[in-house]
Structures are given as structure tokens and as C-alpha cells.
Image: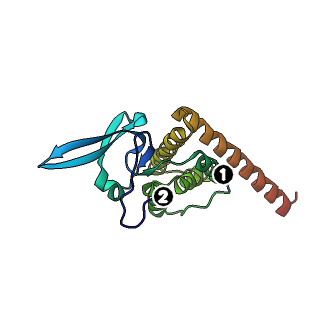
Amino acid sequence: MARKGEIMQFSVGDKVVHPHRGPGRIIDVERQQFLEELKRYYVIDMPTRSLTVRIPVRRVDEVGLRLAMTREKVARVLDILHARPSLLPTDHKERQENVREKIYMANPIPMAEAVRDLTWRGRSAHLTKTDSELLKLVQDFLAAEMALASDTEVSEANETIELALTDNMNAMVERERRERERTDPA
């Protein structure tokens, strides 16, 4: 990790995440002459988006480019998906702002929380069209990074997310049923 005032340095082959474009792998460091100055760019292949992005080496911190999660972090993300959901605000504007903040962090832990919490809300209440779009956006981003971290396909990462969510939601429904039976004996 770069110290304060130091620019984060990456190498060819590093798995990285652009906060707005998603995960990819650095495939080259190009040098280009621009207005009598030699500039270096990280060339990032983002196969899930069919993009190649060039980021000036001097702007990586400003852009927010970071290393992709590790396999260990994938396990932590799955733990988050299995955890008890947090209740989201009932006001749709407040709820969506809350979720957008987690998405814009481009950090896998808050994104996993957003996926889990929106999924639960969809099971227990109503998701607006915007809620559903946000859920798809954040789950796709999370799955793409998980796939990159574990060297799998995005579809496989999505299946892993769906399985974790289904297991969690079924367990939540069962806990609620048992709680109702305990407090309201028939």
C-alpha cells in the first residue's frame, strides 16, 4: 500500500479495480509522448465490459484504482452475504442514496452488504425499479471482482452469490417463523 504522498504503483499482471469501470488486469504500461513530456499509462483489460482503459500512472490515486480483492476477501464477502441483513430505510430516496454510497465506495464489503440488504428487502417488502437496477448493478460489479479474484467466470461468481443469498434468506425466513411460533403459540 502506498504511503501518504506516494503514488500507488502497479505491475503488469496485477488484478485491479477501477471504481467506475470495474475490475480488470493490467496488461501493459505504455509510455506516450504528449506535448514534449513522456507520460506513462497503465493499460487495463476489462473483459467483462469489453473495454481497455488507460489510466495515467500519476492519476491512479485520484481515479481510485486499487488492487482487486484477494481470495481471502472473497471468503469475507461470502460471510457478509450469509450474515443477518440490515434494514434499509423505508423512504426510497434515502434507501437508494444509502445503496449508492456503498456502490461508489467500490469496496467489496459495503457492496456485499448492499446486495444482501436489497435482496432481503425484495423478499420482505417491495423493490422499486431503481432499487432493482441498483441491486443488479452492485451484484454484477461484485460478481465481476469475485470472478477476477478467484480466476473463475462471472457467471460462476454470480451463482455463488445467489446460493449464499438463497441460503441466508431461507434461514432468515425460518428464524422469523420460529420467532412467531414462540411469541404467538396457537
- Residue that carries the numbered disc 2 in the rendered image: 102
Give the label on residue 68, or none. Answer: none
- Which residue ends up furthest to the left in the rendered image? 35
Asked whether 119 or 3 is in front, the reply is 3
The chosen color scheme is rainbow
| Amino acid residing under circle 1 | Asp
Residue 2, picture quadrant: bottom left
Give the label on residue 79, or none. Answer: 1
Asked whether 117 or 121 is in front, the reply is 117
| Amino acid residing under circle 2 | Lys
Left or right of residue 56, residue 82 in this image: right
The crowd level at tag 1 (other Cα within 10 Å; few <14, some 14-19, many 20+) is some
Q: Position of residue 4 (x, y in %)?
A: 40, 67
- CB within 8 Å, label 2 to label 1: no
Task: Say which element carries label 1.
Answer: helix
Left or right of residue 172, residue 185 in this image: right
Task: Say which element carries label 2.
Answer: helix
Q: Position of residue 64 (x, y in %)?
A: 38, 56
Left or right of residue 54, residue 177 in this image: right
Asked whether 135 or 81 is in front, the reply is 81
At 52% from the left and 35% from the top, the residue drawn is 154
Q: Is residue 58 above or below residue 133?
A: below
Residue 165, picture quadrant: top right
